[in-house]
Image (cartoon, rainbow, N blue to C red):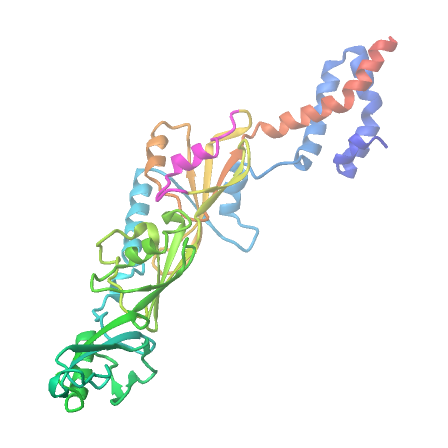
């Protein structure tokens, strides 16, 4: 059997072979009516089996009225009233989305804590406790000052440090100024007029952590300048992806909130003032939509910008294919809010591009992440495909017949 006939169902192939002689005679004798009748029967038998990249508009409409599957959906024609209603619902949903602003709190960032590394210097005059005072002066008294700088001193888990002659000193929860006064108070009676300088050499307890899709992840110290969320991200080299494709996962204590980076503006309530222990993770989560049907190329398209309208989405995909598309049947598949409840339901939004007003409406209809756009095939495509296949099948036989005659 010729492999060109393998695309047909078995009943269709049988019909073709039974009627081939009649059809060839019709060509030879010029019986056009018999040929048209044969092709009509073949069209009825073969159209249902022709390959297609999706349903026609009529099939989608029939399915919505008499669903034969588990998913029940409704179709909404996009007009001005529908667009206004959808945009109103979108504004209400955006107003209740979780944001970072409720996590705001005030906290000091200059207190000494466990793990901090301190630099301590002690200055004395006369007979010193740490400077090894000399007795070269008359009367055995040296009026010059002597200083001693201790090696880096680490604050232990209990917030304490150990110094010679002083023992254990509690400095946790103190500022550097308060800690140096406490060390100086411990030296009184042991040294003559001691002076203490104490500074935080390495700040561990007053730091935040930035990880994920940034160029330089790591731990970043906080200063009295009161760094904010966007400052920390900038210190980490910025996001490795566009802000609209990046999610900020912010952890403060036992609370976690996610918000898209592109929606956070500098000095806004969402640009939180950081407190020690905050953890910031940037996650790449691009928004995309998918285009199927009568287009030049079926594709998944990234938003790349903050908002994308339906008009922009169609243009990015190349728009309806002029040769095969039905411009009155542009469908957008989405899980929308169920009327009267908090649940979701499958909804298909239909746009008719044969109406000039639809191009205005498409500019006001915002795309959602993971939307599916389907451009239906024109109803005339199936017969055209069938006639094309018939022409491929029988053209060699007709040509051979004419040559032999």
- Point out the image quarter for the C terminus: top right
Residue 213 falls left or right of residue 150:
right
Residue 301 falls left or right of residue 163:
right
Residue 331 falls left or right of residue 249:
right
State the residue at coordinates (37%, 40%). Answer: 308
- Point out the image quarter for the N terminus: top right
Task: Work out whether residue 42 or residue 247 is closer to the camera in this orientation and state it.
Answer: 247
| The residue positioned farthest toward the top in the image shown | 405
Q: Position of residue 16 (x, y in %)?
A: 79, 29
Task: Work out whether residue 26 or residue 161 is closer to the camera in this orientation and state it.
Answer: 161
State the residue at coordinates (32%, 38%). Answer: 364
Asked whether residue 279 appears in the rendered view, the answer is no
| The residue positioned farthest toward the right in the image shown | 404
Tell me where residue 379 sits by quadrant.
top right
Q: Position of residue 212 (x, y in %)?
A: 43, 59
* Magenta-span inclusion, residue 283: no
Task: Work out whether residue 265 or residue 14 is closer to the camera in this orientation and state it.
Answer: 265
* Magenta-span inclusion, residue 317: yes
Q: Position of residue 213 (x, y in %)?
A: 43, 55
- For the magenta stretch, what is the residue range? 304-322
Tell me where residue 315 sits by quadrant.
top left
Tell me where residue 107 sits by quadrant.
bottom left
Which secondary structure dominates the residues rendered in magenta? Answer: loop
Residue 244's place in the image compared with 183, above or below, is: above
Asked whether residue 12 appears in the rendered view, the answer is yes
């Amino acid at each position: 059997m010729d492999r060109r006939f393998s695309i047909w169902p078995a009943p269709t192939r049988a019909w073709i072979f039974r009627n081939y002689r009649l059809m060839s005679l019709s060509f030879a004798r010029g019986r056009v009516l018999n040929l048209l009748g044969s092709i009509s029967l073949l069209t009825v038998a073969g159209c249902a089996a022709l390959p297609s990249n999706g349903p026609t508009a009529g099939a989608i409409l029939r399915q919505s009225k008499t669903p034969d599957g588990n998913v029940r959906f409704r179709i909404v024609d996009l007009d001005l009233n529908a667009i206004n209603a959808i945009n109103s619902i979108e504004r209400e949903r955006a107003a209740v989305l979780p944001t970072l602003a409720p996590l705001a709190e005030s906290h000091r960032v200059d207190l000494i804590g466990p793990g901090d590394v301190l630099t301590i210097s002690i200055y004395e005059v006369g007979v010193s406790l740490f400077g090894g005072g000399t007795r070269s002066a008359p009367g055995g008294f040296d009026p010059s000052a002597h200083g001693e700088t201790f090696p880096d001193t680490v604050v232990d888990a209990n917030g304490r440090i150990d110094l010679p002659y002083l023992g254990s000193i509690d400095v946790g929860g103190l500022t550097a100024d308060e800690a140096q006064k406490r060390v100086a108070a411990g030296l009184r009676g042991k040294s003559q007029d001691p002076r203490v300088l104490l500074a935080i050499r390495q700040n561990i307890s007053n730091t935040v952590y930035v990880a994920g899709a940034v160029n330089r992840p790591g731990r970043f110290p906080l200063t009295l300048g009161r760094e904010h969320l966007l400052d920390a991200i900038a210190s980490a080299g910025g996001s490795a992806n566009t802000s609209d494709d990046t999610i900020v996962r912010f952890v403060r204590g036992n609370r976690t909130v996610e918000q898209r980076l592109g929606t956070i503006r500098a000095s806004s309530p969402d640009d939180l003032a950081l407190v020690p222990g905050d953890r910031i993770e940037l996650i790449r989560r691009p928004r995309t939509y998918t285009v199927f049907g009568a287009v030049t190329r079926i594709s998944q398209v990234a938003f790349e910008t903050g908002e994308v309208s339906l008009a922009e989405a169609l243009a990015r995909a190349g728009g309806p294919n002029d040769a095969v598309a039905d411009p009155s049947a542009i469908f957008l598949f989405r899980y929308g809010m169920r009327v009267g409840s908090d649940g979701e339901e499958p909804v298909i939004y239909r746009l008719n591009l044969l109406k000039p007003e639809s191009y205005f409406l498409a500019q006001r209809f915002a795309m959602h992440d993971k939307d599916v756009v389907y451009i239906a095939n024109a109803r005339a495509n199936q017969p055209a495909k069938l006639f094309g296949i018939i022409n491929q099948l029988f053209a060699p036989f007709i040509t051979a017949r004419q040559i032999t005659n």
